[in-house]
């Protein structure tokens, strides 16, 4: 008779892009959510880093993947053009944020403003936050900036006063420190294949390719069946076939085929890259902190990549 071991991992995810679920969970209003988090051994956490404290996930083996801010913002805009941004041009969105969140220093929307009148308030605040230094925000381990205080992030892009510069330095210092000390692996979206290879090296059960030839099967009579050690007893089962199991990374959250932003709910065909220099300028303007974070992530990734390549020569 043979003896086998079966392993299973409980998985759960918490995403700020689902604002109602996220808020109820972090405010302990959803016992089922909290229970799932405590039971899970693997978790996808798309939210500010400081929120992990209340779930006692401070010392877990964490992975993060950082993306070029220009590509990330434009991808977000294409992905949720309708439900987040009411089919508005991205330049209009940035001008709106500057007017109501930056210069006026208020989170209130004037009654006569109809730019985002059809978008729910909870979705609106989360969606707008995605366009302004959002990766930096999510790497803060302290609540130095309130989740709903979008004016701070707008000011980080348009206000160069001495007091604001000091706050930006504090934010960047904390975010980059966490990038370097809170994560086992720092990946880069632009090098996703290498990121996946490194993840599979550190966490073998997350590898995109698993070979059965590397697995040793043990039996009760101490005979073993493996790559180079076959049991001679005819009653023992044969070794498993020498096959490779591949689990390639899929492309999740791709842009919709019909964003319903054209005439009569047809598709507004947006290019895969920002369409003009003004859009690019605005994305860079409102993501200056994310650009610095991305540079630090690239440096960290390169060190890890060199170490991985040395090990796997």
Image: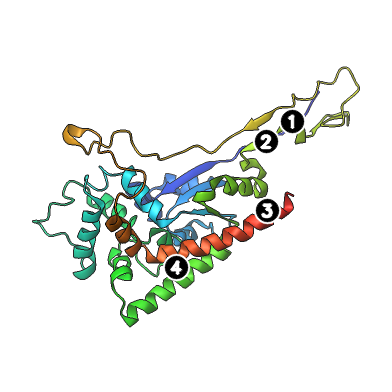
Cβ atoms under marks 4 and 1 closer than 8 Å = no
- Residue occupying the point 47% across, 66% down: 175
- Please tell me how crowded label 2 is: few (under 14), some (14-19), or many (20+) other residues with Cα within 10 Å: some
Q: Which residue is mark 2?
A: 210
Residue 234 versus residue 258 in the image, above or below? above
The residue that label 3 is drawn on is 308
Q: Is residue 28 visible?
A: no
Question: Pointer 1: what residue?
Answer: 4
> x%, y% of residue 179?
53, 63
Q: Secondary structure at mark 2?
A: strand
Give whichever of discs 4 and 2 has the lower sequence position.
4
Where is mark 4, residue-wise?
142
4 or 2: mark nearer the eye? 2
Q: Nearer the viewer, residue 288 or 203?
A: 288
Please say if the residues under marks 4 and 2 sit with CB atoms less than 8 Å apart: no
Quadrant of the image for the N terminus?
top right
């Amino acid at each position: 008779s043979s003896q086998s071991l079966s392993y299973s991992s409980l998985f759960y995810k918490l995403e700020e892009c689902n604002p109602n679920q996220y808020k109820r969970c972090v405010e302990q209003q959803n016992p089922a959510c909290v229970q799932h988090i405590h039971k899970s051994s693997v978790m996808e956490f798309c939210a500010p880093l400081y929120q992990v404290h209340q779930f006692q996930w401070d010392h877990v083996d964490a992975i993060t993947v950082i993306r070029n801010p220009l590509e990330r913002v434009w991808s977000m805009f294409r992905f949720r053009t309708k439900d987040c941004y009411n089919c508005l041009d991205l330049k209009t969105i940035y001008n709106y944020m500057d007017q109501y969140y930056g210069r006026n220093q208020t989170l209130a929307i004037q009654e006569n403003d109809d730019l985002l009148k059809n978008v729910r308030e909870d979705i609106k605040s989360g969606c707008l936050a995605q366009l302004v230094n959002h990766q930096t925000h999510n790497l803060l381990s302290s609540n130095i900036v309130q989740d709903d205080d979008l004016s701070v992030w707008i000011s980080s892009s348009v206000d160069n006063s001495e007091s604001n510069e000091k706050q930006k330095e504090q934010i960047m210092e904390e975010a980059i420190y966490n990038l370097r000390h809170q994560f086992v692996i720092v990946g880069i979206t632009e090098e996703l294949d290498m990121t996946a290879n490194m993840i599979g090296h550190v966490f073998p059960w997350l590898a995109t390719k698993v070979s059965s030839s590397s697995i040793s099967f043990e039996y009760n009579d101490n005979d073993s069946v493996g790559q180079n050690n076959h049991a001679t007893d005819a009653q023992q089962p044969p070794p498993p076939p020498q096959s490779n199991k591949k689990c390639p990374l899929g492309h999740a959250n791709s842009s919709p085929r019909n964003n319903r932003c054209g005439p009569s709910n047809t598709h507004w065909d947006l290019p895969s890259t920002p369409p003009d220099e003004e859009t690019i300028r605005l994305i860079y303007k409102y993501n200056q902190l994310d650009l610095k974070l991305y540079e630090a992530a690239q440096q960290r990734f390169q060190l890890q990549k060199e170490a991985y390549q040395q090990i796997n020569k």
